Amino acid sequence: MSAVLASAAPAPMRPARRPAAPVACGLALVLLALVFLWHLGQGASHLGVGDVLRVLTGGGDQLADDIVFSGRLPRTLAGLVAGLALGLAGGLVQGGTRNPLAAPDTLGVNAGAYLAVTAASATGLSVGVLGTGAAALAGAVGAAALVYALAGRSLYAPGRVLLAGTAVALAATSLALMLQMLDEQTARGTFFWGNGSLIQTGLTVPLWTGAATLVLAMAIPGLVRPLDLLSLGDDTAEAMGINAGRMRLYVLMLSVAFAAVAVTVAGPIGFVGLVAPIMVRMVGVHRHAWLLPLSGSVGALLVLLADGAGQALQTAAGGEIPVGVVTALVGGPVFLVLVRRLTTGDAETGASVTEARPLTGRRYATVVSVAAVLLVAAMLVGLSVGTLSIDLSQMLNPDPLIQSVLSQRFTRVLAAAGGGACLAVAGGTVQAVIRNPLAEPSLLGVTGGAAIGAVTVITMASTAPHWMIPAAASLGGFLALLLVMAVARRKGTLDPTRVVLVGIGLAAATSAVVQVLALRSTMTIGAVLTWLAGSTYGRAGEDLLWLVVPLAVTVLLVIGTRPLDMLALGEDLPRAFGLGLGRVRLLVLMGAVALAAGTAATIGAVGFVGLIAPHLARGFVGSSHRRMLPVAALLGAALVVVADTIGRLVIDPRQIPVGVMTALVGTPYMIWLLRSNRKVNR
């Protein structure tokens, strides 16, 4: 634990040259004023900074006045408020937890607020800015409470806190995405707002949220001294009369309130609350009396600059890149650098895994048989139900309508089963290499890298042959995994928890790139959402050919399981038996990438199957990969088929993508895993 605290805690308050902080504040304010004016000069109309200055001094014409006061000024004020709130939230939560990786987005707070506002909007009620703010605050508080419950005494351990925050964020985002897809008329607006957008319809929201930010900021002076003392450790703070637990709760609640304000005015904007306080510490400012206001100023600068860049990079379809996408493109690499310096203590032992005792041959055969029966039953149900119900006796009916429906459903069910089996085996093999039961393709950025490759071909080479899509997806997934392994490796060893955290950061960055590529295309927002969520809808027979290579790789991995069993033993023992770790890891990971990429090219980005299926299989038959992988493949196939069937039935005749359904199951399962491991580690 001491190693974790040493690497996670921000630098304690230290004597610095007194002019450093005041000079930094002065420079930040001047720069913020200049960027504020520059941002007012951005827009589709040809109205530059000089024209804006004339309008602000009363020398503009009526058209220029309308453009500035009705369109640009509300947007710029929204960026100022959102950035200020996020910077303050990040500075507070990092100071309260002594965790430099803590931020409203990495702790799931932004996603909780986003879900609550999306749910309020989906009801069709016009709740206004106060109602939206109340919903955002309720969602943010709920997410923070859940993360706190999962982390508990491990609040200082950055690995566990970030995994808990990721689980909560994924659950909230999946639910919000489902609500968006249920409301096609407002899907475009909620899609852009869900990626962070400063577009405003007037001054009402920026002014109200700005006032709320100022009111909340009045509580900061009373927290400055306690935060400085907390940076020295709980024992020192307690000795100086500070109740560390209570003060930390106050700080977290205030940061949650700031995050809710930011979501209310601009949607969930990632990485600003993470990067802004770090930039302030890099210039030598550590005392919170200066660090917090500087963090807010830098946060506002980052948001305004990112939004200006998004407006400047107009897409081919005539739109603009959402500000949250730009901040993710910048903040993702910063997150990777920070995680690389992280020490979790799992490098030698690996992360904990729940497994069963080895079974006898007869009992193992029973487990395999039950899993196979479940898969067959799930496929039969998938063929039977839908807008047109077809029972088993009608499946042999030669009626053309029935056979046409069955043909479409059969292709869909096969795509779901094949994709689920491949993802389950990919997850099991990746977990063996990394020695972490939370490792799986979507959490390691592999699915995101594969999506970049596939979407690049779809959007930029629409006339290319179909085989280029899985090929590009495989290349993108492989490059993403190589990057994760290179960043996560330190001193020749792989820390299992660090690998997952690096993958989470890369997944956020790749998601932003995919959205930029999609927005540059002529794809509709509905198609973008469906692709990002994963779907088996409309799959044809030729699409199944993309699974031939992944299924062949699956068979090879199941056959050659001895190296996988040895990889799970750590670094030294496999070398003692003559196993070439580097070569074996590379081959296994290339196989896992082929599985994930082929699945992404066939049914899109489907997550959590590689997490759930191997863990369940390991609990049934033990950790021997010769026995675990076949069971995981059967369970993964059944899971995706069931998820696809439920997605077809819930809102029939419309459909919920299979990726959303697996995320709705997988994120609670991940939360349960984190909770179980917390109890084990006490």
Image (tube, helix red, strand yellow):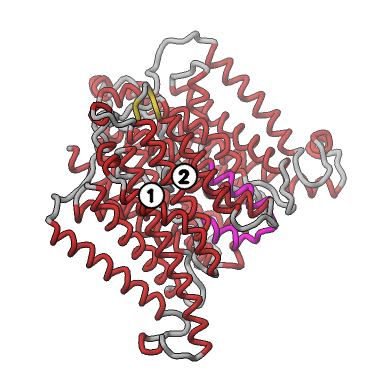
Q: Is residue 61 above or below residue 463?
A: above
Q: Do the residues under discs 1 and 2 have CB atoms within 8 angstroms?
A: yes
Q: Quadrant of residue 348?
A: top left
Residue at image x 30%, y 26%?
4
Q: Is residue 335 magenta?
A: no
Camera-side residue: 12 or 553?
553
Type of amino acid under label 2: Val
Q: Which residue is mark 1?
A: 426
Q: Is residue 210 above or below residue 88?
A: below
Residue placed farthest to the top in the image? 17
Q: x, y (%) of residue 218?
A: 47, 34
Decide whether the magenta segment is chiefly helix, strand or loop.
helix
Residue at image x 37%, y 27%?
342
Q: Quadrant of residue 80?
A: top right
- Secondary structure beneath dot 2 equals helix
Type of amino acid under label 1: Ala
Label disc, if present, on residue 446 of the rendered structure? 2
Measure the C-alpha gap from mark 1 to mark 2. 10 Å
Determine whether, in the image, residue 202 is placed left or right of residue 395.
right
Q: Is residue 518 magenta?
A: yes
- Secondary structure beneath dot 1 equals helix
Q: How many neighbours does mark 2 have within 10 angstroms: few (below 14), some (14-19), or many (20 or more)?
A: many
* Span highlighted in magenta in the image: 510-533
